[in-house]
Structures are given as C-alpha cells and as structure tokens.
Amino acid sequence: MKEAEQNKAENFAVLSAMMKAGLKPGPKLSPIEYARRLAVEKALQQRRYCDAFALWRSCPHKACCRQRRCGGDAADCLRRALDRVPHPQQWRARQDILAATPPNIGAPERAARQCMPRDLYE
C-alpha cells in the first residue's frame, strides 16, 4: 500500500510541475481531420511496403524499374503482390517500419504504420 501512495505522490508532483510550466495537452483532432491524416498515411504506407518488397523489379512500368522504387499506383501493385510475398517477410517489413517510426508521431500516422499490408485493404 505504501508503494502505491508513493506513486500517486510522484504522479501528482509531475502533473503539478507541468501545470506550473504551462504545458497543456494538445487539442484533439476532429474525426474528419483524423480520417484525412489516416488516409494519407495509409497511402504512404502502401508505397513503403512496395519499396520494402522491391516490387519495382517485376513491375511492368519502365519508370518504376528506372527509379528503383514504386512510381505508379502503389495500392494496385501491392494488392497484386500480397499473395506472392511470404507472411514472415511481410511481418519483418512491418517491424522495420515500426522501428524507424519516431516516438512522437501522431495517432493517425501511428495507426497506419501498425497495419500489416493486408490490413490496408480490409
């Protein structure tokens, strides 16, 4: 019981110091803004997966092969390739993307980056 009271006292001290410093929680996103940012990040996430799986190597668009990255419709390209890419490789790509994610990223962006490739279409 004593340890719980000590944790409460520490939490109160931290919160009161934040209030004195003028730190306030940021404003919440409106549902429309959240959905917009989530959709934009999901489109970027599809392109990240296309590049992680090197789908440009088998792409029929010459520009993708030349640039060595997806330069066309990433959503369509990824959808076609999902059955060919093994699940462990998909999991590893997701883990690499999450490892490169900054800790202070926004909620919609974090939600999109936590998706597996197949989750981007369901």
Image: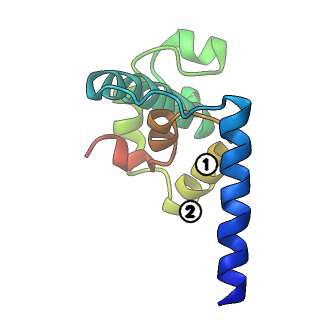
Q: Foreground: 63 or 19?
A: 19
Residue 45 locus on image (x, y percent): 49, 33
Query: Which image quadrant is residue 48 in?
Result: top right
Name the residue that disc number 1 marks.
93
In the rendered view, does 67 fall on the left or right side of 114? right
Camera-side residue: 105 or 50? 105
Could you give the CA–CA distance between mark 2 and mark 1, rounded to whole angstroms?
9 Å
- Residue 74 is situated, as x and y percent measured from the top left of the image, at 43, 25
Question: Dot 2 corresponds to which residue?
Answer: 88
Determine contact: label 2, label 1, CB under 8 Å: no
- Looking at the image, residue 42 sits to the left or right of residue 86; the answer is left
* Displayed quadrant of residue 25: top right
Q: 29 or 36: which is nearer to us?
A: 29
Colour scheme of the rendered structure: rainbow
From this viewpoint, is residue 100 visible? no
Residue 46 on image: x %, y %: 46, 32
Q: Which residue is pictured at 63% across the width and 43% down the height? A: 97
Figure check: 71 above or below 52: above
- Looking at the rendered image, the quarter that the N terminus falls into is bottom right
| Front in this rendered view, residue 84 or 114 | 114
Q: Residue at x 50, y 34 (%)?
A: 109
Left or right, residue 17 beside residue 110: right
Classify residue 17 by image quadrant: top right
Where disc 1 sits, the SS reads: helix
Q: Amino acid at mark 1?
A: Ala
Q: Residue at x 70, y 72 (%)?
A: 7
